Image: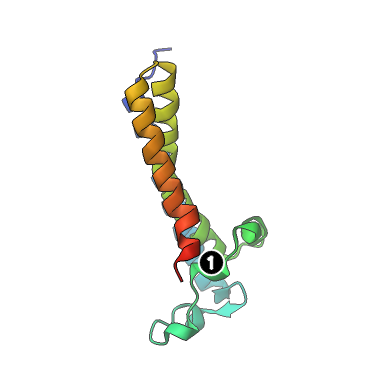
Amino acid sequence: MPKLEQSDITSLILKAGVLASVSLTIAGVILLFIKGGGDGYSLSYVANYHNPSATVDSKILFPGDFLKGLIGLDGLFFISVGLWVLIFTPVTVLFDALITFAHERNKLYTILDAIVLFNLLMAIFVIPRFVS
């Protein structure tokens, strides 16, 4: 079996992440229409964009409930997981590059990659907690 180049691995991660994300999101939209809503909200409530106080956003879907929502075939959770997969696809690429650079003992790129990965994870997990 031929050895995979780093660019091949990156390409595979990106393709798999986008495919999984799109599949989950489409499945979620289909489930929303089949069930007439999701997570106890009607389809008209979920789709209401005229009244910002009466809309469903990601703040009501807790990651701890994702598995329950997926098992229950809840469309909102499928869409949410699809978006998280899309968000973490480039994070996975950065993590893979970090391992590769460290394995190759390329100190400069290992440090630069670690800084970018740290900044990205801070932007995803820490900063939103301080922004209302």
The residue that appears at 35% across and 19% down in the rendered structure is 106
Residue at disc 1, secondary structure: helix
In the rendered image, residue 27, in percent from the top left (x then y), is placed at 49, 59
Left or right, 68 with respect to 77, comes to right
- Identify whether 51 is placed above or below 83: below
Task: Using the rendered image of the protein, determine whether residue 22 is visible from the camera's viewpoint.
Answer: yes
- Identify whether 111 is placed above or below 83: above
Res 48 → quadrant: bottom left
In the rendered image, residue 107, in percent from the top left (x then y), is placed at 37, 21
Amino acid at the residue labelled 1? Leu
The residue that appears at 44% across and 17% down in the rendered structure is 103
Q: Which residue is the site of mark 1?
A: 76
Number of on-image labels: 1
- Identify whether 127 is placed above or below 6: below
The residue that appears at 38% across and 26% down in the rendered structure is 110
Task: Using the rendered image of the protein, determine whether residue 82 is visible from the camera's viewpoint.
Answer: no
Image quarter of the N terminus: top left
Of residue 120 and residue 21, the one placed in the foreground of this image is 120
In the rendered image, residue 36, in percent from the top left (x then y), is placed at 55, 77
Res 35 → quadrant: bottom right
Res 3 → quadrant: top left
Of residue 10 and residue 62, the one placed in the foreground of this image is 62
